[in-house]
Amino acid sequence: MSGIEAVFFDCDGTLVDSEVICSRAYVTMFQEFGITLELEEVFKRFKGVKLYEIIDIINEEHGVELAKADLEPVYRAEVARLFDSELEVIPGANGLLDAMTVPVCVVSNGPVSKMQHSLGKLEMLHHFPEKLFSGYDIQRWKPDPALMFHAAKAMNVNVENCILVDDSSAGAQSGIDAGMEVFYFCADPHNKPIDHPNVTTFTDLAQLPALWKARGWNITR
């Protein structure tokens, strides 16, 4: 790899501490339609999985045909309510973003409106002016690498010269398949191990500058 041109960050669970909140919203959503799920099971099984895929899985497992158009508004409203009352920044995120010396962007399976809500509430949006990229933009979601190519094109960078920081196995796989260097954020012990030459596992965002410098990438001040 030549010089690093940009760093792509996932949002939920990487920059904002929202994974448990989202899991709680899934539980509430399904409960409203008569399906009871355990929070821990939802968190472990569906971290980084897009909403529509989760609905498909639960429909199949429970032998029902709940409509995405009915469930999604319930989920979005509950997420928004919980974000407003409970959302926090992942420790070290602001310090890392303040220190970056190369362009950064966000690549998320969630809609842009959700990123704007979470990052805006936590006063982090200024790091990403017009640099929020969603699977909904192109109707393709991680682990599909298409979102990485989409973001790289919009950023006018070569995707293979970019780093992805992501806390989900689906996200990490999208980076692998796009030919990126992946830094896999495993603060959560439930994370699925990934053994791949392009993947570096870490547990604290504060570790990243030293990990990058050790690779010869001076991309933080």
Image (cartoon, rainbow, N blue to C red):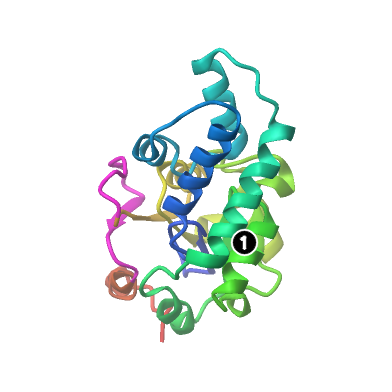
Q: Position of residue 90 (x, y in %)?
A: 40, 68
| Residue at x-position 53% and y-position 24% | 57
196 in relation to 151, above or below: above
| Tag 1 residue | 115
| Residue at x-position 60% and y-position 41% | 141
| Residue at x-position 60% and y-position 16% | 64
Q: Nearer the viewer, residue 14 or 173?
A: 14
Q: Position of residue 194 (x, y in %)?
A: 31, 42
Q: Nearer the viewer, residue 143 or 51?
A: 51
Residue 59 appears left or right of 156? left
Q: Quadrant of residue 91?
A: bottom left
- What type of secondary structure mainly makes up the magenta span? loop
Residue 40 appears left or right of 151? left
**Is residue 194 located in the magenta-colored stretch of the structure?**
yes
Can residue 156 be seen? Answer: no
* Quadrant of the rendering where the C terminus is positioned: bottom left
Q: Position of residue 166 (x, y in %)?
A: 43, 55
* Quadrant of the rendering where the N terminus is positioned: bottom left
**Is residue 182 located in the magenta-colored stretch of the structure?**
no
Can residue 202 be seen? Answer: yes
Q: Secondary structure at mark 1?
A: helix
58 in relation to 156, above or below: above
| Residue at x-position 29% and y-position 54% | 201
Name the outermost residue toward the top: 63
| Residue numbers of the magenta segment | 188-205
Total numbered labels: 1
What type is the residue that disc 1 sits on? Met
Q: Position of residue 189 (x, y in %)?
A: 25, 48
Neighbours of disc 1 within 10 Å: few (<14), some (14-19), many (20+): many
Q: Nearer the viewer, residue 151 or 66?
A: 66
